[in-house]
Image (spheres, rainbow, N blue to C red):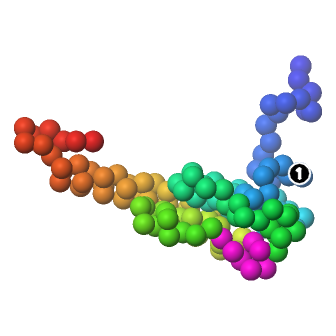
Amino acid sequence: RRGSGERGEPRLKGEASGFEGTPRYMAYELLAGGGYTEKVDIYSTALTLWSMMTTEVPHAHIENGKDLLSIVHQQQLRPPLQPVVNVWPDMGRVLACGWAHEPAERLGAYEMQRELDEAWAAIVQEESRHMVDVGCAVGCTVM
């Protein structure tokens, strides 16, 4: 019989207590001692996606935790979207809506999934268009 404190015990939405993680990827409201919500995860997901697309660390130039909180919250600084938009234009909207300053303005989980699906479809469509453009003489396409 498993006790409720054992690892692997499922939690329902809204039952998180405390927080763990990397401050650079945390929503400012969590860093400031606010409560944990779905919007905190959306913010972190947007920063993680940005990091994966750019191979950079968000706010890498900021070393002090207080400075990080100040810059992200008070100055509302976010990583630059241009490197992402230059390659994947539709992803810029997803990221911006995911890391919006006000939690209420951020996408919900289902909205983010829908937006990511649409952005991915646009990427695939664009890539497919380019594959046709570079077809070889014998009728094959280059991937």
Q: Is residue 37 visible?
A: no
Residue 25 in view of the camera: yes
Residue 8 position within the rendered picture, expressed as x and y whole percent measured from the top left: 80, 31
- Mark 1, residues whose alpha carbon is within 10 Å: few (<14), some, or many (≥20)? few
In the rendering, at what x and y percent does residue 48 appear?
Answer: 63, 54
- Front-most of residues 130 and 5: 130
Left or right, residue 128 beside residue 75: left
As helix, strand or loop, the secondary structure at mark 1 comes to loop
Residue placed at 91% from the left, 32% from the top? 4
Residue corresponding to mark 1: 17
Picture quadrant of residue 90: bottom left
Three-letter code, disc 1:
Ser
Q: In this view, does 117 lie to the left or right of 103?
A: left
Which residue is painted at 42% across and 66% down in the image?
86
**Which image quadrant is residue 107 in?**
bottom right
Q: Which residue is drawn at 78% across and 52% down?
A: 22
From which residue to which does the magenta span run? 71-78
Vertical placement of residue 55 versus 81, above or below: above
In-image side of 119 versus 12 (left or right): left
